[in-house]
Image (tube, rainbow, N blue to C red):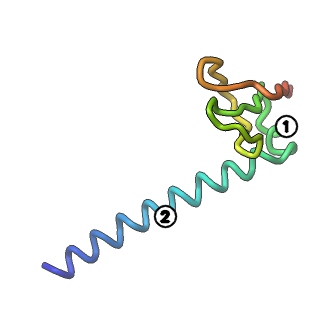
Amino acid sequence: MEITTAIVMLVVVSIVAASIVLLGFHLLLTDFTWFRKWKGGTWYRVLPRGYPYSINAVWTKHYDPSIEILIAKEVWL
């Protein structure tokens, strides 16, 4: 029983860790202009409301003015 619990916990922790790493990798990539140009379309640099520092701004393809402040906009063909 303890071995089964340990294996399940190991799998869950591995999945969570992998998800965090992949999200961080995606956010890191979007900071590079070549990545946004390669993906194309319209990109928005937004700051979530309630975060006073621009270090919290991220590049995204989806902009919701009710919860985010627009800092910059790029359009890539």
Q: Quadrant for residue 50, please give it.
A: top right
Going by the picture, which residue comes out furthest to the bottom? 3
Image spot of residue 43 (x, y percent): 77, 29
Q: Is residue 52 above or below residue 3?
A: above
Q: Residues within 10 Å of mark 1 (few under 14, many from 20)?
A: some
Closer to us: 19 or 69: 69
Earlier sequence position, callout 2 versus callout 1: 2
Q: 8 or 52, which lies in front?
A: 52
Q: Position of residue 68 (x, y in %)?
A: 65, 26
Image position of 50 with respect to 28: above or below: above
**Residue 66 screen position, x and y as percent:** 60, 18
The image quarter containing residue 48 is top right
Give the number of the disc on residue 37.
Answer: 1
Of the residues tagged 2 and 1, which is closer to the observer?
A: 2
Kindly identify the amino acid type of the residue bearing the numbered disc 1: Lys
Quadrant housing the N terminus: bottom left
Residue drawn at 20 percent across, 75 percent down = 4
Q: Which residue, given by chain and number where applicable, does mark 2 sit on?
A: 17
**Residue 36 x/y as whole percent:** 80, 39
Q: Residue at x 65, y 37 (%)?
A: 51
Label total for image: 2
Horizontal arrangement in the rendering, residue 4 relative to residue 29 (left or right) = left
